[in-house]
Each structure stands twice: as structure tokens, then as C-alpha cells.
Image (spheres, coloured by chain):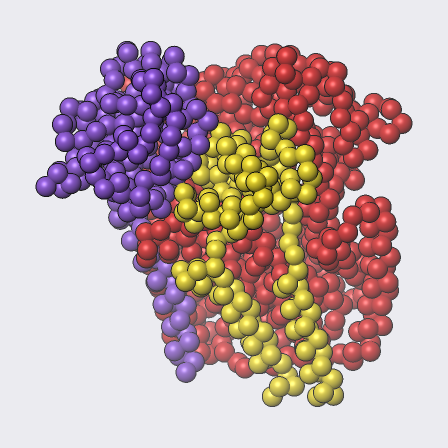
Amino acid sequence: MKKKILILPFVIFSLVLLTFFYLLIIDRNPSEIPSTLLNKNYPKFETESLLKKEKFLSVKEFENKTVLVNFFASWCKSCSTEHKFIQRFSDDETIKVIGINYKDNPKKALAWLKKLGNPYSNIAIDKNGRIAIDWGVYGIPETFVVSPEGIIQYRHVGPVNNKIFKKINSIIKKNDK
Amino acid sequence: MTSYLGNFLLWSSLFFAISQFFISRKINQQNLKFIGVSVIGLLISSTASFFLLMYAYVISDFSLLNVFQNSHTTKPLLYKVSGVWGNHEGSMLLWILVLTIFNYFIFKLNSKKNYFFILKSLETQALITIGFILFTVLTSNPFERMISNEQDGLGFNPILQDPALAIHPPLLYIGYVGFSAAFSMSIATLKLNNEEKILWFNYMKPFVVAAWSFLSIGIALGSIWAYYELGWGGWWFWDPVENASFMPWLLGTALLHSLIIVEKRKSLQAWVLFLSILTFLLSVVGTFLVRSGILTSVHTFALDPSRGIYILIFTALLGGYSLILFGNNSKKYFNKNYFTFFSKEGSILVNNILMVVVCSTVFLGTVYPLLIEALTSNKISVGEPYYNSTVVPIIMPAILIMGIGPILSWGKEDKLKIFKKILPSIFLTAIMTMIVFLFYQSYSLIGVAGITLAFWIIFNNIMILIKKVKNHSLGMIVAHLGIGLLILGITGSSVWQEEKISRMKINNNVQVNKYNIVFKEIKEIKRSNYLALQGNFVVHDNKKNIVTKLKPENRFYPITNIFTTEASIHTSLLGDLYIVIGEGNLNDGWVVRIYYNPLVIWIWIGAFAIFAGGIISVNSNLKKLKNLS
Amino acid sequence: MINKNHISTKIFIIVMMIFLFLPFFNKSYGVEPDEVLEDKKLELRARDISKNIRCMICQNQSIDESSAPLAKDLRIIIRSKIKEGKKNDEIYEFLTDRYGDFILLKPPFKLTTLALWFLPFIFFVIGVYVVLSHNKKSK
């Protein structure tokens, strides 16, 4: 009986270390928080549009196509670095790229788009960041993939890079089939 | 050049550590001479490597990558020096230095009677040292060469430029690493043959007390830094990094006290051996958590998985070996002992158990988010509210018992006698608590409990001092008084904190507690390594006398592009007035946060008393040890 | 003698139990002047909630202490919800629906956090058992 109890510290110790080991070797970003919105309907919203006079109605904009939703702002540095990838998405005919301009000055945002090029088919203005909160956004840029059925399939926090670009593309391809 | 010399010193440290390991495996008295060469060689080469790096920092030798990344020519000298351990690689050199110093102290204890024990302890100590030197050389070498030629360094985080933080890591490391000596001695004890008899616990005790004292003051300085530098009036956040130092402290406390029982009664030996193993393992696991980047936290050092994997393997070997050894060899140290509840050993036992329970809870809270993430890929947070509702209620009875423990006698005691002994302190505690609450006029259950417990401890210890009870160590009384003051400060500052957040224009005034604070002016100032906006607040008391002028700053460090807020604090024995200035402009005014934090100074006074008590006790324990041999 | 000792251990356990159910420390930091609600009771509620909400970008800080913009937005939302007459639970639900359990500094009672909340209690019970089993009079 006593002998068995003496093994216990060793067993607990090993289990804890195994957990650490597992977390160390898997591909993981400790500061990324998984979205609770995955596999749920996208949060609907209504707001001004940066590009058009008509109101931006999410119900109208999100139609039977895969939609890429990108939260951005002209003041956000890493938004410029991911811009070329967003551009590449806009070349894809099978999807629609929608921008949500987060806490920005509309004039500055338009100037920024003029300089870098506009990849978005429409842009919603999120003046006070309320839409972002509904989407569970905590640091821009953030990018979401919404299926043609309006289900959120993927969320990425931080600038899109080559790896993420490929990942998103594979999701889009699957939807297209 | 510096790089070659540094690497040479690191490799020679490794050489001496390995030779120490092999020499220590032959147990005979003559070997002490040979091993002395290794021990001293190790000490000299690790000291030299440490001071070489320090020299490189002081003269801004940018031929070292580490200096280039973490220093800057405009940095004040103090922060150039502390920059050595302000980063991961440099701090490993400090870690190794402390390890070899303790190694030397163990060696110094040798005599004809104890050579087998000392040699066996030095064997384990050598293994630990080898592990950490290899880690430094392989994954975090501070002497890596800088390829290009640079005129100036990248500087370092201005938040870390603070005197308290400058000396915080060395003290903390003395604490962590000091427990390695207890660990080595515990392993040595477990490996003793049946014919080898030694009072191992007497050897272990001064090391444990020293490590514990330094850990205490190290943690306190970390808190002081947070309080003065982070600028929101708090000083403890249950951050994983803080927990990593708090857990060994809790186990160290248990270890320290059960060593007293072993000394007096020869019981609980197996328990002490187990605790000393666990305490050091927790220190290493704590280091792992901080350095591996497995959790993100305000304090985390640079992320690198290879480091994490190395420390993990090292910890696994260390822990696996020691825990299995304990499982196999500890049988002869077990003896079922019974205690009366109301006796000194009874109270120590209860305290011991409660410390371990608290430590397990803190450990659970710290690793649980990681467990959940590994198992479900979900993330949860375990923050202050969790610890407040789990740790606080467990620690309170421990404090209650702590007040009475030193008064109780060994063996058993008549309850009526005990009652007579504590009657004066019960009386005094009740009176003082009432006075305090008449003064503050704000009641809450937790406040009453905290203040009562604080005075309970303080008066019990004062009574011991007054009555000049024999056989009471001064160190214990001072340290216990320190705990009492600490609790007083913690309770006061948590329960009665006042806060005023307002937008103030020039010449506006606010009333906080008994102070009237006038915002006089705001101006730009320029220092060698930062620019700042400095507010000037004049503080008046009730009678309209000027108490002090407070000048909080908003600093901008152009080198690293970092903004910091510098709180300005008026400290008195009753409480701190704490002002932070936020955003704003001349037209709308500035956001000004003013806190009145009652009794905060007693937290620091308490912590220093704990440290002083510990050092007194180390001294008396060393004397005891000398008489022994 | 035997009885007396049993009574004292019982008293000891009862005292510990009382401590277990005490309400706990309240601290207050942060928050900007223009956010504060006029009704002091409601403001206090808002502060209590924000102390339990984690600032997502800063690690281990509550939104009550943080100066991050998102923390400020969330503080304002919490206050507007309180003004609308929403209950605390509804506000917590609103936040976890968007940000998950991660945003709660005090983890919720759930199947996955069962061990987190009950183990300390079990540790404590084991501790009490160890103490009692070493009590001289119990043998």
C-alpha cells in the first residue's frame, strides 16, 4: 500500500511534464485565442458604407458566395503588410472580399486604399468598434471566412501571410466544390 | 576577443563541474582535497565569466550579440550592470554563478566526520551545475559573437529600468538555487548506506533558511517594482511568473518548519526529504514555465522552443531520478508519528499541510489552462478572482495557527495553560482591532479578519519577546512579526483603498482621503534617454499646510519607442498617496488617477523583517552546525 | 480527555469552514472619468463585472485595470448594458458569446473546470485527514 503511494508523485510529475512537452512540440501560438464563433452564423449588422451611399446591410452583402471578411484600419501597420494577400483574394472570382474599417477616419481610410489599391467589393464602417466586438475581434487585422450558408468557418488573428493564405484558399476551394 | 574568452570560461566551468562529478563518486576522505580543486576552479571560472559579461556591458562592447541586443551607450551605469541579468542568456550566467557559490559553501562544510555526506551532496550538485552550463552553452550562450560592427545597441525595455527590479533577479535566484543545496543533500541522504549516520537535517537547515529568506525578499522586490512602475496601484497579480516564485516559497516555508520538528523530534524525516526534492523541482519547473514561452505573460523572456525542450528534458531527468530514488530508498526514514493537536509540533504539522494545500492550488491554477488547452484546444483564464476565492480561505487558518504555534510547548500541553498564555494577546488584539476600525470607519468581514489576524500575530510575538521565553530564536520572532506587518499592509491596502479618477485642468483640485490635491502645472522635460511630460501636484492636508509636491510623469523612450507612466508617490506610515497622470491636453484637462493606499509601507517593512529574521536564523543555525563538527 | 480533544478538532474544522465562505478582497483601479456612471450602485456593479473580465490583448490584466482601447470599449458596453437593466449573468453571457470563456478571469463552473474548482477543496480535505490521522488521540 505504502509503496503504491510513493509512486504517485512520480506519476503526477510525469503527466504534467508530458502536457508541457505536447504543448511545446505542437504548432501553437500561445497568444492566439480560438474564436467561439466558429461553425456558427455570422453576426448580422447594419452600418454606413465607406464606398457607397447606400447603407451597408450584411444580409444583402453576404449572399451565396464564400465571403472573406477583413477587419482593417489605415492606422494599423500590419494591415499594410497583409494587403497584398487580400489583393490576391480579390482576384478570385469565386469569393467576395468585404472589408470592415475599424475605428478609422473615413478620409484617411480612402487615401490609404487609393495608395495601396482597393481589394474590397464593399467596406462597412465600424466607427466605434461595436461590430468588431460582435465578431469577437480583439486585435486587428483579423480575417474571417464565411461560407455561402453564412457560417463562420475560419478566423485568423494578425496579418495574413503565405501559410495562412494557403490555408484560407484550401477552405475556399472546398466550398466551391 | 571577449567572445573567445567568455566561451573559454564557460567550457572550463563545464570541465570543472564534470571533474567534480567524477571525483565525488569515490567516497574516501583523501578525495576531499582533489574535489576542492574542482569546486574552487568551478567557482573561479563561473565568477570570471559573469564579471566578463558585466564588463562587456559596462564598456558597451558590441562585439557580443547579447550586449548589442540588450544594452545602449546612453543607459545609466546601474542599468548597464543590471542589464547583464535583465535578459535570458545573461541571467543564466548569474544562475550558474549562484549555483557554484552554493556548491562551494557545501564543500566548505566538510570535515572528517561528514566527508561521505558532503561528497554525495557535491555529486548531485555537480550534475545540476553540468545541466545548467550545458543549457547555457547549447541554447543560450551570452558570449555569441556579433557579426557586423555596430555603433550602438538596441537598448532595453525602459519598464525594466528600476532599482528594485535591478536587484530583484539576483535575490530571487539565490532563493531558487539555494534550494538546490537542500535537493542535493536530500539525494545524498537517500543514498547513504546503513552504516553511514549523520545529522543531515542540521546541514540542510541553514541552506533552506537562506534560500527561503532570499526568495522572500526577491518576491517582495518584484512586488515593489510592480507597485512603483506599472502604475495602477497594484502589487500582486497572480501572474504565472509570480506564481512560479510563490510556489517554491510556500513549499520552502513548509520545509523550513518541518526541519524544526526533525531537529527536535527526529520524526517527519521522509516528509522533509520529499519536500526538499519537490521545492527545488518546482523552482526548475517555474523557470521552465517562464523561459519556454509556453505561456504568455507580461514578464516572459524571449520565445524559443529549443530552450523549452532542453529544460523540459533536464527537469524530467532530475525529477524522474529523484522521485524514483525517493520511492525506493525512503523506507527507513518513515516512522509513523502521532502528535497532539495542541503542541508545537502539532501546530507546525497543520501549517505544513496548509502550505502544501495552498501550493497545490496555486499550481493547479497555473497549469490548468495549459491542461485544458492540451486536451480540448479551448482556452480559459485563471485570474485573481480564482485565487482570492481558493487560496485566501485556506491561508487564513494557517495564519491563525501561526500566531499560537510559537507559544505552545513540545509534546503536549494543558489547554487551560495555553489559554492563560494567550489571554493577553487576545485582549490586546481585540482592543487594537477595535481602535483601527474606529479610525477607518469602514467594515467588511475580510477587513476584520485580516486586521485581527495581523494583530494576533504581532501581539503573540511581542509577548514572547517581553516574557523572554527561553529557547525562542530571535530570527523566528522577527520573521513572524514581519508576517504580521505584511498581513496588516495587505489587508489595509486591499480593503480601504480609495480612488479618484478625474479629468483635471490646471489649478483644479480634488479631495482624496485627508488630502487636497491641486494640479499646478504640466511641463515637458528632457533626460539623457527619455522625454517626459511632468505634472506638478501640490498636496495639502486638512489644515491647508503643504504636505508634499508630487510629480508623476509620462515618459517616452525614443530608443525603443516605448511610452511608460511613472507614478509619483507620497509615502507615510498610514498610507501612500499615489498619483498617475494619463492622457489629455490643455483644453480638456488630463486624466488623473489618484489612489490612497492605506498601510502599503507595512507590506515592505514586513517583507524586510521577514528577510532580516531569516538571516538572523541562518546565522544561529550555522553556529549550531559548527558546534556539531 | 478524549472528548475534549475531539471537540477542539471539531471547533478547528468549523473555524476553517467559516473562513471558506467569506467574501473576498475588493480592489479598484483603472477606468476613465468620462465612463463613470452617475448612479453609484450601478457603477459599483460595473466595476465588479469589469474586474472579472480579462483584457484580451494584455495578459493577466482585467479590463478594469487596463488602458487598452478594447478594454475601454468593453467597459463602456458593460455600463450601457447595466443601464438597460440587464442582469450580471446576461452581461457575462454577452461577453462569452463573443470572446469565449477565455475572457472570464474567474473560470465558470463547467464540466471542464470541475477539477479546477473542486480539487482545492479535495486537497484541503486530504490535508485535514492527514492531520487527524496523525493526531495522538485518534490512535
Q: Position of residue B36 (x, y in %)?
A: 44, 52
Q: Look at the picture and state if B557 lies above or below C136.
A: above
Is residue B288 visible from the viewing direction of this image?
no
**Residue sitting nearer the eye, B194 or B366:** B366
Residue at 74 percent of width and 41 percent of height = B598
Q: Drawn colour of chain A? A: purple
Q: Drawn colour of chain C? A: yellow
**Residue sitting nearer the eye, B249 or C23:** C23
Residue at 21 percent of width and 29 percent of height = A96
**In the image: residue B341, left or right of residue C90:** right
Q: Position of residue B389 (x, y in %)?
A: 58, 57
Q: Look at the picture and state if A73 lies above or below A145.
A: above
Choose top left, top right, bottom left or bottom right for residue A166: top left
Q: Position of residue B96 (x, y in %)?
A: 43, 44
**In the image: residue B465, left or right of residue B590:** right
Residue at 72 percent of width and 56 percent of height = B445
Quarter of the image with the N terminus of chain B is top left
Q: Position of residue B475 (x, y in %)?
A: 70, 56
Q: Look at the picture and state if A114 lies above or below C137.
A: above
Furthest residue in direction left, as rendered: A177
**In the image: residue B429, left or right of residue B560:** right
Q: Look at the picture and state if B132 lies above or below B577.
A: below
Is residue B480 visible from the viewing direction of this image?
yes
Choose top left, top right, bottom left or bottom right for residue B352: bottom right
Choose top left, top right, bottom left or bottom right for residue A37: top left
Quarter of the image with the C terminus of chain B is bottom right
Residue at 76 percent of width and 32 percent of height = B512
Label count reads 0
**Residue sitting nearer the eye, B317 or A157:** A157
**Residue sitting nearer the eye, C69 or B335:** C69
The red chain is B
